[in-house]
Amino acid sequence: MNKLLILLLALTLQALGQPLRLATFRADVTPPIGAPLCGGLVKPVVGVSEPLQALGVVILSDDKPVVLCAVDWCEIRAGDHVHWREVLARAAGTTSERVAVQSLHQHNAPLADAAAHKLLAGFDKPPSVIDIEWAEKALAGMAASIEAALKNPSPVTHIAHGEAAVEKVASNRRIMGDDGKVAKMRLSSTKDAALRELPEGTIDPMLKTISFWNGEQKLAALHYYATHPMSYYGDGMVTSDFVGTARERRTKDDGVPHVYFTGCGGNIAAGKYNDASKESRVQLGENIHAAMVKSEQKMKRVPLTKIEWRARPVVLKSNADFPEERMLKVIENSATTASTRISAAFRVGFIRQSAAGVPIQFTSLHLGDDVCLLHLPGETFIEYQLFAQQLRPGGFVATASYGDGGPGYIPLEKSFAEGGYEPTQAFAAPESEKVMRETIAELIRMK
């Protein structure tokens, strides 16, 4: 595109009252030695393989700014997620409902749940969930990075989108038996050759990419793919794992900020292709990076003249099979394993959040007429991502899950009868599927 056409487009956008601009931000959120990882469910920090980042974009228009943020943490839950969005909103000069904060969800990383940490602290021999003081400092650093970025935003004239199949990464965790029940679980890694030989099962094989442009200049790229991003963990070595290393390599490739969002990977992991070796981590990263590159090779830039942000506050009912009184007894028993007490504290937090009517934010960003970015909470099953795409045939829908981690896993309603691990860590009621689908439809469909 020649300079005259770019100038004419910019003048047209200004005349329409829609001067779109983009700011990119990046902040280090690496925990210190000794800090809890995965909410205290794995070994605390003993070292750092890769520093953790919080990074994203702020989109400026004639409406209030929109913030899209991906954090290299395991989860940000409940009240913490609300707090984070409020702090980042103030930094960006917007409102919290226009801020999407999604976690990467690798396990050798912090998990923010101050309410669970404080609840456990009221009992004997409490396990530690999060270093609250340090987490606040990390959040302040993120806010400062946004404030700095907003001093020099770039005009946005175009977007581009593309997708590519990821080779040999994702596989479904839930292997069904002939009786309609989960027969075996193939988690993030497996050395069982028989499990690895089984089919991938239901996945979304595509990595999707959206990039922002100022004429011929690429400003940033957002990548979306659905899988648990874990090769191996529990050794105390902080890491962004294979998706983080792929993202950082892609950023070095072209010197442009790249952001990675984990999609609906609740029932998806790399178990078919990962034996938990260091070599497997490297290969998984290679495969993600290759798909990132391919997804951008055939992109076509199209003018961006409008954006639309949608937000839906939703209250998901808690699972009545796990009453608060029983969970508190689990927490109280100091002879119980730390992981069991921590999980019970997480569940109590969600029960109380639901009972108080505190909503969870579901949001979407529409870029022009074709592209929609969907932001969901919890560890949602892949079927929700596929459902969202089916609602926009011919459109381009990219889904980021792992927003508010309060609900834990969000399976399908039938999943509870099928068994397996995920329903045991699903804090919302089984009938939440209906609410999920209705909300996704509201956020996705064209008006």
Image (cartoon, rainbow, N blue to C red):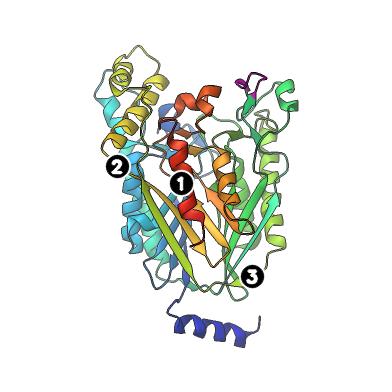
Q: Earlier in the sequence, mark 2 or mark 1?
A: 2
Mark 2, residue position: 358
- The answer to whether 223 is drawn above or below residue 169 in the figure is below
Under mark 3, the amino acid is: Arg
Q: Residue at x 69, y 30 (%)?
A: 272
Crowding at dot 3, Cα within 10 Å, few <14 / some 14-19 / many 20+, comes out as some
Mark 3 sits on what residue? 301
From the top left corner, tell me how far across and down residue 96 is, in percent. 33, 55
102 vs 142, nearest the viewer: 102
**Which residue was labeled with disc 1?**
438
Label 3 residue SS = loop
In the rendered structure, which disc, 3 or 1, sits on the residue that comes first in sequence? 3
* Residue under the image location 54 percent in, 72 percent down: 304
- Picture quadrant of residue 229: top right
Vertical arrangement, residue 377 with respect to residue 2, above or below? above
Q: For the residues marked 3 and 1, what is the alpha-carbon distance in whole angstroms? A: 32 Å
Q: Which residues are magenta?
A: 176-184
Q: Quadrant of residue 298?
A: bottom right
| Residue 268 at x, y percent in the picture | 60, 35
Q: Residue furthest left?
A: 122
Q: Amino acid at mark 1?
A: Glu
Tell me if mark 2 has few (under 14), some (14-19) or many (20+) residues whose alpha carbon lies within 10 angstroms of its own.
some
Nearer to us: label 2 or label 1: 1
In space, the residues marked 2 and 3 are separated at their CA atoms by 41 Å
